[in-house]
Image: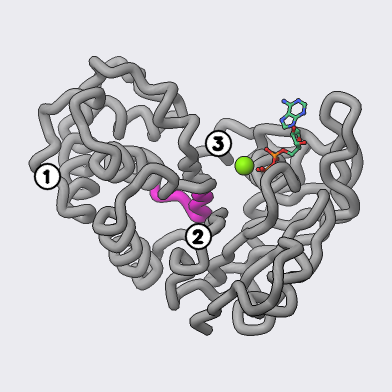
Amino acid sequence: MTQPSFLELKNVFIVRGSKQVLSGINWCINPGEHWVLMGPNGCGKTTMLEIASGYLWPTDGEVYLLGGKLGEVYLPDLRREIGFVAPWVLGRIQENVPVEDVIASGLDASIGYVSSISSHFKSQIRHQLEFFEALELQGRHFGELSSGEKLKVVLSRSLISKPRLLILDEPFAHLDLTSRYHCYDFLGKLSREPKGPSIVLVTHYLEDICPFFTHALLLKEGHVQAQGSKKEVISSDLLSQTFHIPKKSFICRN
Ligand SMILES: Nc1ncnc2c1ncn2[C@@H]1O[C@H](COP(=O)(O)OP(=O)(O)O)[C@@H](O)[C@H]1O
Ligand SMILES: [Mg+2]
């Protein structure tokens, strides 16, 4: 039997304020696929991912998350299966929260608050930090950490509930080149885990498109400009049409 898709948006429209932000979006993520999402500022990428993770409801259209239809499934259970990392998540975590609590808060999709951590989850947290080669962050407070260290903690938080879908909305925005390259390695390692999640990355940088990404979607003014295999979509022609800049500006490494 074929596995259901992890995410399906069917003819999705959304109005925010007085603006039509997304129009007629069709998008499907199947198990084993890893997607890059690109498009100019304000074109609707974050809105699309907020719909995809069950935090926003479309004005029209249907959303299927991990086999369940939005509106017919119990969202808190589903949210545990979706890891979400965005710069605003980092901003919401108070400086004095211990690293272990930040990570544990991912178990109930809250941000930085936990009542108590069982010894079983303590060992899971250690394991998660080990994955990111960041065991030395145990016992530190979130506010003391560098941007790269904070991202490792927030990635650990998003993975602690073993999600099937990991959504990364411009996660590398404040990282230097070294930290970025380390993150590429960790995401590559995650993509090779037998039960690892499908990864969706929003980025403005072509160098962030690691070899493990299989598919890409280009969004422009709330419409899908192109989607499909990474090789076909991340091309100078389509990027030039999406971003309105000359083809020669893009050096694609596909
Ligand atoms: N809470 C909101 N209320 C009204 N409009 C919003 C809200 N959030 C985003 N928008 C508008 O929706 C459009 C798309 O925003 P967004 O999805 O954040 O774009 P992107 O992530 O591609 O930069 C923008 O015009 C933005 O101003
Ligand atoms: Mg955005």
In this image, 223 relative to 213: left or right? right
Q: Amino acid at mark 1?
A: Leu
- Pinpoint residue 103: horizontal percent, then vertical percent: 30, 34
- Pinpoint residue 84: horizontal percent, then vertical percent: 50, 42
Q: Secondary structure at mark 2?
A: strand
Q: Which residue in the structure is indicated by mark 2? A: 199
User: Which residues are the magenta region?
Assistant: 162-168
Residue ID at (78%, 56%): 220
Q: Secondary structure at mark 3?
A: helix
In this image, 61 relative to 148: left or right? right
Q: Which residue in the structure is indicated by mark 3? A: 77
**Does mark 1 have its CB less than 8 Å from ligand 2?**
no
Q: Is residue 1 visible?
A: no
Q: Amino acid at mark 3?
A: Asp
Q: Dividing the picture into quarters, in which one does residue 250 lie?
A: bottom right
Cα separation, mark 3 vs mark 1, equals 29 Å
Cα separation, mark 2 vs mark 3, equals 19 Å
Tell which circle, 2 or 1, labels the residue nearer the N-terminal end. 1
Q: Which mark is residue 135?
A: 1
- Pinpoint residue 170: horizontal percent, then vertical percent: 51, 48
Number of the front mark, 3 or 1:
1
Residue ID at (40%, 64%): 195
Q: Is residue 8 above or below residue 102?
A: below
In depth, the one of 198 and 3 nearer the eye is 198
Q: Amino acid at mark 2?
A: Ile
Cα separation, mark 2 vs mark 1, equals 24 Å
Residue ID at (83%, 40%): 21
Residue ID at (24%, 23%): 143
In depth, the one of 19 and 7 nearer the eye is 19
